[in-house]
Image (cartoon, rainbow, N blue to C red):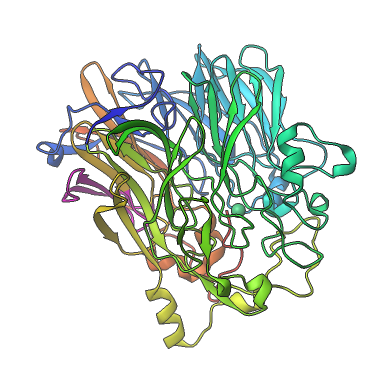
Amino acid sequence: MALCSAYATAPSAGDWPVVGHDNGETRFSPLSLIDEHNVGRLRLVWFHDLDTHRGQEATPVVIDGVMYSTSAWSKVQAFDAASGKLLWQFDPKVPGKIAIHVCCDVVNRGVAVSKGRVFVGTLDGRLIALDARSGKPIWTVSTVEGKRPYTVTGAPLIAGNRVIIGNAGAEYGVRGYITAYDEKTGRKLWRFYTVPDNPRKGFENAALRKAATTWSGEWWKDGGGGTVWNSLTYDADLDLVYFGTGNAAPWSGPMEGGDRGDALYTASIMAVRGQNGAYVWHYQTTPGDVWDYDATQTLSLATLNIQGQPRQVVMQAGKNGFFYVLDRKNGALLSAEAFEPVNWASGVDLATGRPIVNPEARYDKTGKLWVAAPGGLGAHNWHAMSFSPQTGLAYIPAQEMPFPFLKDRDFTPSEVGVNMGIDLASTSLPQDPKVKAAILAGLKGELVAWDPIAGRAAWRAPHPGPWNGGLLSTGGNLVFQGTAAGDFLAYRASDGHQLWSFPAQTGIIAAPMTYAVDGRQYVTIVAGWGGVFPLVAGELAFKSGRIPNRSRVLTFALDGTASLPEPVAPRWTAPRSARFCALTR
Ligand code: CA
């Protein structure tokens, strides 16, 4: 098997210059000062308590010894990466009322840094350029349209001299798009919409004209959805920006009833030209999705040797349970294999690229309850995947979280609430202890090391429950992951043998990263339990280990000597009655 790393902008060895480490979003660092032989000596060197108790989803960036990160409510911090000294912090003062339009907690997944500027997208839809030395704003633009309730939780992407940002809100009646801004001035350069508007208004481009033929009903009234709320990736050689799109709204099909149609370009992986935002290709992972199978998970770029040919690919472990390998020049499907149990489709037809859908799974057509695997929280959600060119394996924070879907026959969309179009009464967690125990037993989390060429797992490491942190892989033959149960773990990347653990005193959902300053390698994780699962799933979330949120930046190195203060017991307890409802992202 021949492999090589694929990112176009090679970062200097000690830096972690973008949230995904590189523009190919491998989350692989070649650093090997910490390796499989000495990782047992890894200790805490510094920590920083964050001023929030909401979920932490950011991966920091480190450039020239300075760490830039974000916390809940889109706040930005800069640290001396070696000592942990806080250099500055920036609070965009997001209005608290925005929280009613936030499906999945008031989180932020990190910054982009370029030419002495730090870019952050804020929950209320602003894109702000900060001076990297002072944290002072240089320019601010609003990235949202009209009065629609858009939110921004994802990290911006730098592509050439452009900064690109998407948004969230498919369940709240928005029309998805990404926008490119001049990184120097904040001037809007282009906007690419993922779904067509009302055909009477005309179409912005031919791709949207074509997309409109794949919808039924009056989808534009509820925005359409298809939001780009997470992964953005860039191949500078091809000048292609890759992104994944979210669900169509509402989940259960057109408000008027009937079949939705494929609903392009929702639940799709797409490529547009970086220079002008022109459509280049799309691959729809879930045509006519009714299960909230957003295709917004990590998009990792690599060159894989497939049947003797080096292929430039983009890979995604989808919410819908299939691991996709696509030719990233043209979007051709090379393989799609299930990495977790899947019951909505029996497979993917490589000739047509379409899933072979189980008719029973179409609860919108049958009118019957369907317990979908995966459920709406996905076999893999936003928690970042990592791809190691060294082992040739993709490391997936995977989970089993089945979800019952039943169409709401009396659905009427609300202007302020979450619009899913499913009967929430059917999704209440039964209080019968036996039924409850069975449901809890069905919730699983594991780290899957996936061989994308063979299309199967090389190894799996189980966790106590679902909703665990994202992944980091390194040149030291290591993978790192934090868990919902509160452990920060290191495994041997090649075989999954656990080599190290640290009790983090809190559930972890973010992905770790690593960097070097003055010849010493560090590993950092932004710890803190939260996101949509604990927000809406009540006691189900405690399957993973009754872990509170203590939001902290934790940094480790060999022979570190810092220690955490003794934990104080949390003051809150789990809500008694929980629902599966609104398990969305
Ligand atoms: Ca969604």
Q: Which residue corresponds to the image point at 31% horizontal and 64% vertical from the top-left?
A: 464
- Percent across and percent down for residue 518 are 24, 15
Q: Which residue corresponds to the image point at 42% horizontal and 57% vertical from the top-left?
A: 467
Stretch of the chain drawn in magenta = 482-507
- Percent across and percent down for residue 381 are 48, 51
- Percent across and percent down for residue 206 are 74, 33
The answer to if 502 sits in the magenta stretch is yes
| Foreground of the two, 581 or 53 | 581
Can residue 149 be spotted in the picture?
no
Image quarter of the N terminus: top left
How many numbered marks does the figure carry? 0
| Foreground of the two, 366 or 439 | 366
| Foreground of the two, 116 or 188 | 188
The answer to if 27 sits in the magenta stretch is no
Position of residue 130 in the picture relative to residue 319 (left or right)? right
| Image height of 218 relative to 156, above or below | below
- Percent across and percent down for residue 57 are 47, 43
Can residue 254 be spotted in the picture?
yes
| Foreground of the two, 27 or 70 | 27
Toward the front, the furthest residue is: 351
Q: Which residue corresponds to the image point at 15% horizontal and 38% vertical from the top-left?
A: 39
Q: Quadrant of residue 439?
A: bottom left
